[in-house]
Image (cartoon, rainbow, N blue to C red):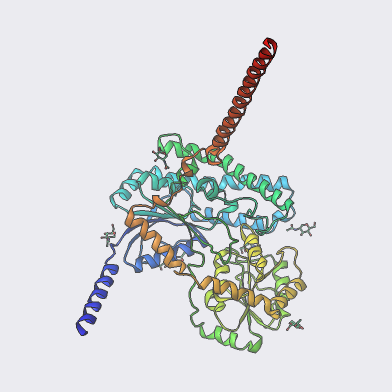
Amino acid sequence: MVAMQLLGLWAALLLLCGCQDTQAGNLLVVPGEFSHWLNMRVILDQLTERSHNVTVLVATASPSINFSRPERYRFLVYNVPFDRQDWISINDDFIKFLMYESQNASMLQIGLWVWDMMQKINVIQLNICDALLWDHKLLETLRQLNFDALLSDPMLICTDLLADVLHLPLVFSMRFSFGMSMERLCGQMPAPPSYVPAATLGYTDKMTFFQRVHNFVMYTVYDMFLYVYSRTTVDQYYSEIKGTPTTFCEIMGKADIWLIRTYWDFEYPRPLLPNFKFVGGLHCKPAKPLPEAMEEFVQSSGDDGIVVFSLGSMVKNLTKERANTIATALGQIPQKVLWRYSGEKPDTLADNTRAYDWIPQNDLLGHPKTKAFITHGGTNGLYEAIYHGVPLVGVPLFADQPDNIMHIKAKGAAVMMDFNKMTSQDLVDGLNKVTNDSLYKENMMRLSRIHHDQPMKPLDTAVFWIEFVMRNKGAKHLRVESHNLSWYQYHCLDVAAALLALVVLIIVVTVKTCTFCFRKCFRKTKARQKTE
Ligand SMILES: *[C@@H]1O[C@H](CO)[C@@H](O)[C@H](O)[C@H]1NC(C)=O
Ligand SMILES: *[C@@H]1O[C@H](CO)[C@@H](O)[C@H](O)[C@H]1NC(C)=O
Ligand SMILES: *[C@@H]1O[C@H](CO)[C@@H](O)[C@H](O)[C@H]1NC(C)=O
Ligand SMILES: *[C@@H]1O[C@H](CO)[C@@H](O)[C@H](O)[C@H]1NC(C)=O
Ligand SMILES: *[C@@H]1O[C@H](CO)[C@@H](O)[C@H](O)[C@H]1NC(C)=O
Ligand SMILES: *[C@@H]1O[C@H](CO)[C@@H](O)[C@H](O)[C@H]1NC(C)=O
């Protein structure tokens, strides 16, 4: 009996060793910038924790990655012919235009401005491409390091091309891109416009006829946009590097795994491909204790609790007018407010509100006294709110943010404000609605339960698939064959045409034969009648 148990224990130990003894992989990483980096960093920490060798390629002008900070992964810095401030100021201009100036602009002005901005961003993108792909010394170094795979954020465009040049399997880490054109056109992910709403429209999966028309048109516009962008700016660049005619989408479509930073708590049900994995909320973790002074302030709120307020890491300050409107509103609610705000202190800032340059957002959202979260609707913050079950007051500013908030609003766990148009009273009403009406909290708790009730934690899923790709030299077995089909083959138009032709042929032959027989019989009877 004891012997059996010992044997069992031995077998278990062996198994354990077998699991622990996974070969350490060698991973090359090209991260995105700004909030995208925060997300990527969590994955890299976990990979180094599991003793993989991680090398991060970073530009000398990186606006958000401090490569002189000692980390457990290695930085490999490449030179770009612009500096950090250029990148940051383009980004700031972008945000300022989208937040304020676009409000009063005509469609034409917005169009021209977007075109201008695209050119500026493109200069940065292509400079980075040049730095990565024309620097033969860097490429040689990368080849010698013998990586097993490349992990990248397609926020920088040439990372797929780098993987192709180095013959490395590729894993993307991304949020669904704007309009999902990249996933649909390059990744071949099916998105029927009849029930998968396009980004920015704010529709849910239940659409009326006219909404479906709108949705369909929007998909077409996004697709044309991607097509024109890729034809006019990057296809030629990609072809030049590859040495054969190719397209942006073709190279991007070679990715082995697409790690998408959302999940069913947030998305409407929709089809996914086997190489698309949902890992939304991978950066979320249980709350840690707050700094002492902050905890004291939080405790002083009594039964009313606190409201956490952040418009994200990209928006440091607001116009005086907006800041005052917001501060006035915050002064009228019974809760205490912790506001991440490093701009000039608004005159109307009340005693119940404290502005901080930085807040431990995750720890605050996980605090039992937290009643609501005022957020711009970036996915990182949204997932922390879902993780901890805190209902939202959404003040979306730009890009995917209105759409993100709409998702949570449709699920009954958020109210949405218009940043430029809202008055103090609107914000007060919104906050009271979310904190008084327990339905918001209940709905958010439901999303939270869905989020936590998964067979594997999102971070573990992400790490598993990266390891899978490193172990198996890719995951081509999950890649659908539609990458290899033309549009008429994909929609079976050739098959339909062939079947149609066949049916027509059969009808024609049948008709011909019948008329022929009929005539013959008819003639025969006639002839017989004559002879009789
Ligand atoms: C990780 O990469 C560095 C640089 O190539 C190398 O010196 C080191 O030996 C590698 N470590 C492992 C465990 O492979
Ligand atoms: C980057 O990290 C280094 C070392 O920790 C630190 O001295 C430096 O101030 C940091 N730079 C920025 C811009 O944060
Ligand atoms: C937009 O126009 C209105 C009315 O002319 C003006 O009051 C407002 O300040 C303008 N907003 C911006 C951001 O320029
Ligand atoms: C924010 O602060 C910067 C620098 O202090 C300033 O240039 C910018 O105009 C401010 N933004 C707004 C919206 O006030
Ligand atoms: C909501 O909360 C505010 C502030 O506590 C209070 O004045 C108001 O009466 C509440 N409304 C409802 C419907 O409970
Ligand atoms: C497409 O089909 C060709 C011919 O069957 C094959 O050689 C190629 O590997 C396929 N490409 C992809 C991406 O599956």
User: Which of the 4 image quadrants contains residue 460?
Assistant: bottom left
Figure check: 184 above or below 514: below
Which quadrant would the N terminus be assigned to in this image? bottom left
Q: Where ligand 5 lies, by quadrant?
A: bottom right
The one nearer the camera, 63 or 252, is 252
* In this picture, residue 20 sits left or right of residue 387: left
Task: Confirm whether residue 358 shows in the render.
Answer: no
> Residue 250 at x, y = what percent?
47, 42
Residue shown at 60% from the left, 61% from the top: 268
Give the side of residue 35 with respect to residue 197, left or right. Answer: left
The residue furthest top is 531
Residue 302 point in image, percent of width and height: 64, 89
Relative height, residue 509 to residue 101 (above, below): above
Decide: is 519 above or below 450: above
Name the spot of residue 469 as percent of width and height, x first. 37, 56
Q: Residue at x 33, y 55 (%)?
A: 472
Q: Nearer the viewer, residue 449 or 359?
A: 449
Q: Quadrant of residue 196?
A: bottom right
The residue located at (62%, 62%) in the rendering is 404
Q: How many marks?
A: 0
Query: Can the viewer see residue 104 in this picture?
Result: yes
Residue 343, given in percent of the width and then of the height, sits at 62, 69
Q: Quadrant of the C terminus?
A: top right
In this view of the protein, which residue sits in the foreground, 223 or 76? 223
Farthest-out residue, front: 532
